[in-house]
Amino acid sequence: MKYGAVKNFINGNFITINSDRMFPVISPSDGTFLTELPCSSASDLNLAVSASAAAFQSLSKTPIKERVQVFFRYKFLLEKNIDELAALGSEENGKTIGESIAEIEKCIELTEFACSLPQLVTGEILEVSKGVECRCEKVPLGVVASIVPFNFPTMVPNWTIPNAIALGNCMIIKPSEKVPLSLGKIALLLKEAGLPDGVFNIVHGDAEIVNAICDHPGIEAVSFVGSTKAAQMVYRRATQNLKRCLALGGAKNHLLVLPDATPDMTAQNVTASMSGCAGQRCMAASMMIGVGTIDHIVEKICAEARKLVPGTNLGAVINKASKERIERYINEAERDGAKILVDGRNAVVSGKEHGTYVGPTVIDNVRPDMVIAKEEIFGPVICIIRTNTIDEALAIENTNPYGNAASVFTQNGGAARYVMEKASAGMLGVNIGVPVPREPFSFGGWNESKFGVGDITGKSSIEFWTKLKKSTVKWNPEAGINWMS
Ligand code: NAD
């Protein structure tokens, strides 16, 4: 075992977890046994909630301009430690070092946004009648929880950590049991940046501790990012317990490619979108719908895909079960009549034989009724469906139950506008393979890709992490008593 057993981080200290239920943490890159993760119990969670509640007493009284000073320092620490963080993220998640560096750069951008929050959360005040003022301000919720997936060990946690804490909340985060290490380093950087003990806590475990979080009366709000099945369960459970909840789920993103699309640029974007982070992004292209004659673009996509070499410029998928699941989808599609143009099955990287790699895969002649066209694959696979009209393509996009992203590739502004109007997804792109809105814009899908109101990042997240306090004030005796009194 390369590292010591995973510990919780509570009240500024790493604490041993006593449990018989253990998860091995294996590097997807080469199969190295990194560590083991014991599952926290309800009493471990109680410790974290008590530490958070105590820290909230002083954090909530600290002015926001003072609170964000920690995040200015944290941003510089992320920059200073980018190589170490990227290496750790890559080791536990399997993505390439370049992708890991990009992930930390995104954490830096998220933190910069949190540093700007004092400019965005000023309240409102108005003299509503002579001598009577109404004032409205955004105040923190208290102890909040963030439950995160494996595919971005640092970025998804940083969707929530800087904003929630800068806005005055104390946080308990539950990392993915598949990638628990990066958040330990993040905890140390937050401490070094001057975050008071108890404001940020880590509790490790699996679904059992997530349920305990949803049930805990001391936790005011739960944010969740993961698969749709788990997002639905968490949303139901947390809201049933009268908590505020925002739960982001899985995705199946469609790229519409029109015959007038610029061939090279389109091929590069489609391939990068389907293969980045080995296809394990909730914004990854999964389906490409060609409208009309697009054979010349498909040829270029295959050429781009063949440039991807597992273990070199294409990372691993998270584990053996995931590799087997992805290959099963490809087998089924082939059996049902789809044509495998580029085949990533049975990829083995020399010297990393225990790594879990899937090569780039391009599948043509996919029909909308095939399983591979309906379910989230989460691997470096693009499926191509052929249609004759934009409306046919949109009908396929519209009937998929998810709604994270959709993009169109074309040089025709009218056609692009038509697709933007009709696509049923929260994040849309024109000539962009991964249409992630950047700060200060917010991130969040529609339909079964998100449960709850508002988005998880950017300006929209302010509403999630705060509640409104409205005060009506009368100092002037001239105001007297009237119908409003
Ligand atoms: P996952 O749902 O298996 O796990 C996510 C988190 O939920 C983990 O912390 C896990 O311990 C916990 N969990 C798992 N099963 C649970 C259950 N039954 N009840 C309560 N908690 C449970 O997801 P994953 O495999 O870690 O991540 C991949 C998924 O996340 C994909 O579906 C991907 O699309 C999605 N994702 C979505 C977004 C988005 O913004 N919509 C972003 C990143 C990832």
Image (cartoon, helix red, strand yellow):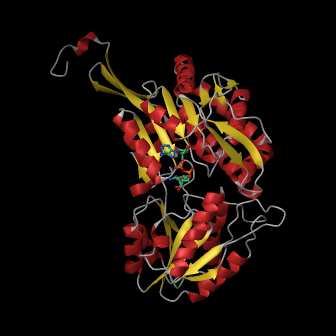
Outermost residue to the top: 477
286 in relation to 316, above or below: below
| Number of residue marks | 0
Q: Which image quadrant: the C terminus?
A: top left
388 in relation to 236, above or below: below
Decide if residue 454 is on the left or right side of residue 276: left
Q: What x and y, as percent, mark residue 433?
A: 58, 67
Q: What x and y, as percent, mark residue 179?
A: 66, 45
Q: Residue at x 47, y 87 (%)?
A: 292
Decide if residue 179 is on the left or right side of residue 211: right
Q: Residue at x 58, y 31 (%)?
A: 40
Q: Residue at x 67, y 73 (%)?
A: 344
Q: Quadrant of residue 312?
A: bottom right
Q: What x and y, as percent, mark residue 58?
A: 56, 17
Frontmost residue, 370 versus 451: 370
466 in relation to 430, above or below: above
